[in-house]
């Protein structure tokens, strides 16, 4: 996670005081002082950081700082780092600015935990869970499920979120395997919005307040039958690959390489229902609709098909 740092310009007049930089750190929700907050100032990424810690009254003091520009970062257990992600702040401090002592407000962390289950109620390990708000995805809001299907967000800001679970890599691999009777595995889980919708229109919003904790959220991933496409491509030598790409409304892209045999024929199973763009060598490009059924006997003529 990246933090945007506050820029401080210290004037020579301030340097002569007992504290070149001083202030207090308080809880943004209650206004109460926060002790034991760790503060760091540095002039650039290569310079060593100078540290300070707040006392029981939440006050801090940097006594020895040369005049110049500094970055400031504050951290404390149970609170989001200051400045918060997505917030850019610049503070210019001079001898006549009247901005000292400064007050830093830390926002209590909000925690969200839950599990991802399949259609049979079994946990799904290795799934990616994305938390997004009404203004789009916030940076750093991605969690992964453990072997019990559990996930945990521990540094969310207050706001309204939608959760979306995306199958892990092993789900894509198993889609091409066969079961104990030699039959292809013909179904798999798909990206699902909380609680159990494949479309964001059916998603339920989760409202988080600063410092609050919500547990036991359950996302039940939807399962669909898989499709296949087969056919022949003319105008290109065999042994090359088609690329089948399917783009979800969320922006996620499903991509599968399809090997073209020496005689120009091809077959690819394990594809999700939807409309795919087939492309080869950035020249051949056509669309195939696997939304409701498989497609066999597709003929792609590279001399007639292109961008």
Image (cartoon, rainbow, N blue to C red):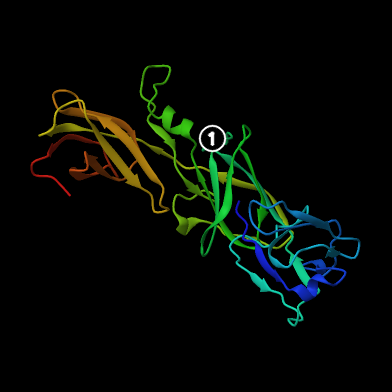
Is any part of residue 37 visible from this angle? no
Viewer-nearest residue: 261 or 69? 69
**In the image, is residue 102 above or below residue 38?**
below
Q: Quadrant of residue 213?
A: bottom right
Farthest-out residue, right: 56
x, y percent for residue 244: 28, 39
Is any part of residue 126 visible from this angle? yes
Query: Within 10 Å of the Cα at label 1, are there few (<14), some (14-19), or many (20+) other Cα atoms?
Result: few
Q: Quadrant of residue 114?
A: top right
x, y percent for residue 17: 85, 72
Secondary element type, mark 1:
loop
Position of residue 200 in the picture relative to residue 142 (left or right): left
User: What residue do we see at 89% from left, 60% from top?
Assistant: 55
Viewer-nearest residue: 264 or 40? 40
User: What residue do we see at 83% from left, 72% from top?
Assistant: 16
Farthest-out residue, left: 303
Q: Which residue is mark 1?
A: 120
User: What residue do we see at 60% from left, 54% from top?
Assistant: 2
**In the image, is residue 62 above or below residue 153?**
below
Q: Quadrant of residue 208?
A: bottom right
User: What residue do we see at 54% from left, 35% from top?
Assistant: 120
x, y percent for residue 44: 64, 57
**In the image, is residue 253 above or below residue 259?**
below
Position of residue 148 in the picture relative to residue 235 (left or right): right
x, y percent for residue 43: 67, 59
Viewer-nearest residue: 140 or 245? 140
Farthest-out residue, top: 181
Q: Count the numbered circles shown.
A: 1
Viewer-nearest residue: 90 or 143? 90
């Amino acid at each position: 996670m990246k933090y945007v740092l506050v820029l401080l310009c210290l004037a020579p007049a301030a340097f002569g005081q007992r504290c070149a930089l001083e202030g207090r750190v308080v809880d943004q929700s209650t206004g109460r002082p926060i002790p034991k907050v760790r503060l760091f100032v540095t002039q650039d990424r290569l310079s060593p950081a100078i540290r300070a810690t707040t006392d029981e009254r939440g006050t801090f003091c940097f006594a020895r700082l040369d005049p110049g520009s500094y970055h400031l970062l504050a951290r404390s257990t149970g609170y989001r780092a200051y400045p918060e992600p997505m917030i850019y702040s610049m503070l210019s401090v001079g001898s006549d600015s009247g901005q000292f002592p400064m007050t830093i407000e830390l926002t209590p962390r909000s925690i969200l935990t839950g599990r991802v289950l399949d259609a049979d109620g079994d946990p799904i390990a290795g799934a990616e869970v994305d938390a997004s708000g009404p203004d789009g995805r916030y940076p750093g809001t991605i969690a992964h499920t453990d072997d019990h299907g559990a996930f945990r967000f521990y540094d969310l800001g207050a706001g309204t979120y939608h959760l979306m679970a995306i199958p892990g890599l092993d789900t894509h691999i198993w889609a091409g395997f066969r079961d104990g009777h030699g039959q292809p595995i013909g179904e798999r889980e798909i990206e699902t919005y909380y609680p159990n919708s494949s479309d964001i229109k059916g998603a339920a919003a989760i409202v988080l307040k600063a410092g609050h904790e919500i547990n036991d959220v359950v996302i039940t991933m939807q399962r669909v039958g898989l499709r296949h496409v087969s056919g022949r491509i003319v105008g290109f030598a065999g042994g090359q690959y088609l690329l089948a790409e399917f783009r979800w409304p969320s922006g996620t892209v499903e991509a599968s390489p399809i090997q073209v045999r020496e005689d120009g024929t091809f077959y690819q199973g394990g594809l999700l229902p939807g409309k795919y763009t087939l492309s080869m060598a950035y020249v051949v490009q056509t669309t195939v609709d696997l939304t409701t059924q498989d497609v066999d006997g597709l003929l792609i003529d590279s001399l007639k098909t292109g961008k």
